[in-house]
Amino acid sequence: MRNLFIAIVASTAAAVLIPSSTNTWAQAPIERQTPPQVTPIKLTLEQRHVIKELIKDSKIANAPADIHLAVGAKVPESVKAQPMPEEIGAKVSQVKSHLVFLQGMQVVIVDPKDKTVVDVID
């Protein structure tokens, strides 16, 4: 009986202490790239509407349609984002210091510090 107990303890210890391909802790850690932390702008529907309406009257550059931009994406150097028009900044203070450009019918708001998209208004 004692020999059976020793055999069980020894095999259990070997299974726990000796790394094998089935033990997940023995495998190399997987490096994951985390997306950059983007602080989105919290705009109400009314503020989004105001921006969209006022931007129509501004001479804002239009980016090529083949560039896919979503919140968190870096704006390519080829896209020239402009300072937010003063009239919009006066009515929607959250975007006063941001950059803006159009892409088709969408208004793209950009963080000037790191040139990432913080909002897209359809």
Image: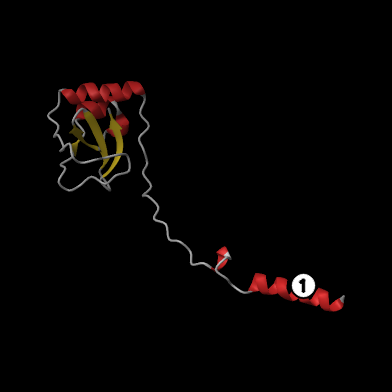
In the image, is 60 to the left or to the right of 37? left
Is 4 located above or below residue 81 in the figure? below
Question: Residue 102: where, in percent of width, then height?
Answer: 19, 33
Is 99 located above or below residue 44 in the figure? below
Instruction: Pick the quarter of the image with the N terminus.
Output: bottom right
Question: Residue 87: where, in percent of width, then height?
Answer: 21, 26
- The amino acid sitting under disc 1 is Ile
Is 111 located above or below residue 91 in the figure? below
Q: Residue at x 80, y 77 (%)?
A: 6
Question: Residue 105: where, in percent of width, then height?
Answer: 20, 27
In the image, is 114 to the left or to the right of 30? left
Residues 3 and 85: in front is: 3
Q: Residue at x 24, y 34 (%)?
A: 108
In the image, is 36 to the left or to the right of 104? right
Display coloring: secondary structure
Q: Quadrant of residue 69?
A: top left
